[in-house]
Amino acid sequence: MVVGTLVADVLLGDIHSLKEKRSVVKPIVAELRRRFEVSAAETGAQDLHRRAEIAVAVVAGDRPHVVEVLAACERLIAGRPEIELLSTRSRVLDATDFD
């Protein structure tokens, strides 16, 4: 078993309310879930209008697949024109890391 996580810190465009923020972040999270069958959620900076933290988690049988899925998720987030990807942190753990 291999577990991978990706945390993306993003800057939103011309956003003036939390409601507008949700209208941008929610479709990104939904697309990540649908396209890559991962767990995804907004996990940080929830009280800030123009910043968001989006986290992704994936579990698979082999490390290369997990790395590939996380990279694809990062590309999807980075490719969204309405946001600017500021940074990402990823981590991949296999069964030996859980002992």
Image (cartoon, grey):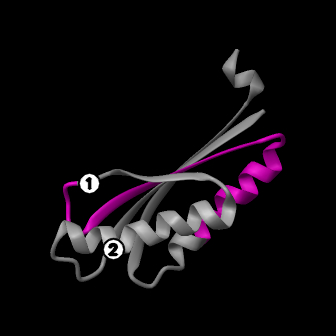
Of residues 86 and 46, the one nearer the viewer is 46
Residue on which disc 2 sits: 23
Kind of residue indicated by mark 1: Gln
Residue 13 locus on image (x, y percent): 29, 80
SS class, disc 2:
helix
Q: Nearer the viewer, mark 2 or mark 1?
A: 2
SS class, disc 1:
loop
Kind of residue indicated by mark 2: Ser
Residue in the image at 52% along x and 53% along y = 40
Q: Quadrant of residue 1?
A: top right
- Give the residues in magenta: 47-75
Q: Is residue 32 magenta?
A: no
Q: Where 94 falls versus 56 (above or below)?
A: above
Residue on which disc 1 sits: 46
Residue 5 locus on image (x, y percent): 58, 45
Q: Quadrant of residue 53?
A: bottom left
Residue 89 locus on image (x, y percent): 51, 50
Of residues 81 and 37, the one nearer the viewer is 37
Residue in the image at 80% along x and 52% along y = 65
Disc 2 + disc 1, Cβ < 8 Å: no
Q: Is residue 74 magenta?
A: yes
Q: Residue furthest left?
A: 16
